[in-house]
């Protein structure tokens, strides 16, 4: 995904920073422990579509 685009994206819940995961399939907000799906390169910034991070994932801050 375009790095510039990523820089413009903020978490819809807390307006915080999002991090793209390693497989580039999700944008993660560690603040809320939520992961937003990226479908065909398009981030889906809807809290209703987001997945809750597991405990392990929450600790995996890189
Ligand atoms: Zn957030």
Image: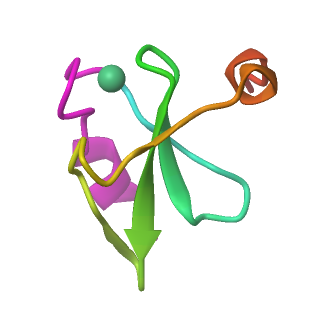
Tell me the chief SS of the magenta region: loop
Above or below residue 33? Residue 41 is below
Left or right of 51: which side holds 54? right
Residue placed at 36% from the left, 52% from the top? 6
- Of 10 and 37, nearer the camera is 37
Residue placed at 28% from the left, 62% from the top? 44
- Of 47 and 11, nearer the camera is 47
Above or below residue 35? Residue 26 is below
Q: Quadrant of the C terminus?
A: top right
Residue 2 appears in view: no
Q: Position of residue 57 (x, y in %)?
A: 74, 29
Q: Position of residue 43 (x, y in %)?
A: 32, 63
Above or below residue 26? Residue 7 is above
Left or right of 3: which side holds 16? left
Residue placed at 73% from the left, 55% from the top? 22
Residue placed at 44% from the left, 14% from the top? 31
User: From which residue to which does the magenta span run?
Assistant: 1-16
Hey, which quadrant is residue 40 in on the image? bottom left
Quarter holding ligand 1: top left
């Amino acid at each position: 995904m375009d790095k510039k685009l990523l820089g413009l994206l903020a978490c819809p819940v807390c307006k915080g920073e999002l991090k793209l995961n390693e497989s580039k399939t999700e944008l993660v907000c560690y603040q809320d422990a939520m992961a937003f799906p990226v479908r065909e390169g398009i981030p889906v910034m809807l809290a209703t579509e987001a997945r809750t991070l597991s405990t392990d994932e929450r600790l995996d801050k890189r």
